[in-house]
Image: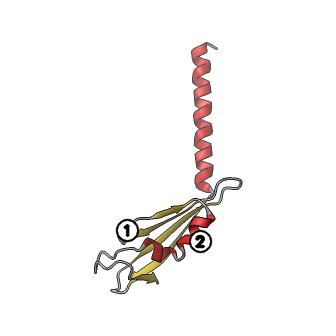
Amino acid sequence: MTQSEIADTLYRVIMISICLAKSRERDMTTRTHRQIRCQCGHTGELRHAENDQPFSSMWEQYTVDGFGGEGATFTNVTELLAAGDILKYLNPKCPKCGIAGAVSYA
């Protein structure tokens, strides 16, 4: 084998390893969806993803679908507990009536 062929083979092995690691990371993420509803009747979802990969750092991510507002990512338990009720913390804004914070779990 020439040096070029060895380098090409090494590059392919590294890229395959990276792809496998990313695939395992995605497989170790638990995702849940919970329906939420505004007082005006508009509905959407609270989406939650968390890292379930053993021996790695903790993270949880929350987003709202169908409502305005920012999502949140927590990287330690202290942050998560300080946030309290996630839905109140995210304070989603209803696109139908325009009111923020009038959302509850359906």
Q: Amino acid at mark 1?
A: Gly
For label 1, count other residues whose C-alpha is less than 10 Å away and answer few (under 14), some (14-19) or many (20+): some
For label 2, count other residues whose C-alpha is less than 10 Å away and answer few (under 14), some (14-19) or many (20+): few
What is the quadrant of residue 44 in the picture?
bottom left
Q: Is residue 24 above or below residue 60?
A: above
Q: Which mark is residue 81?
A: 2
Q: Residue at the far right: name it.
A: 55
Q: Quadrant of the N terminus?
A: top right
Residue 47 at x, y percent in the picture: 49, 68
Q: Is residue 91 left or right of residue 98?
A: right
- Tell me the SS state at disc 2: helix
Towards the viewer: 67 or 1: 67
Q: Is residue 74 above or below residue 86?
A: above
**Residue appearing at x 53%, y 71% in the figure:** 83
What is the quadrant of residue 29 in the picture?
bottom right
**Residue appearing at x 60%, y 14% in the figure:** 3
**Residue appearing at x 52%, y 77% in the figure:** 85
Q: Is residue 84 above or below residue 6?
A: below
**Residue appearing at x 63%, y 38% in the figure:** 17
Q: Which mark is residue 69?
A: 1
Q: Is residue 70 left or right of residue 55?
A: left
Q: Amino acid at mark 2?
A: Leu
Q: How is the image coloured?
A: secondary structure
Residue 31 at x, y percent in the picture: 55, 65
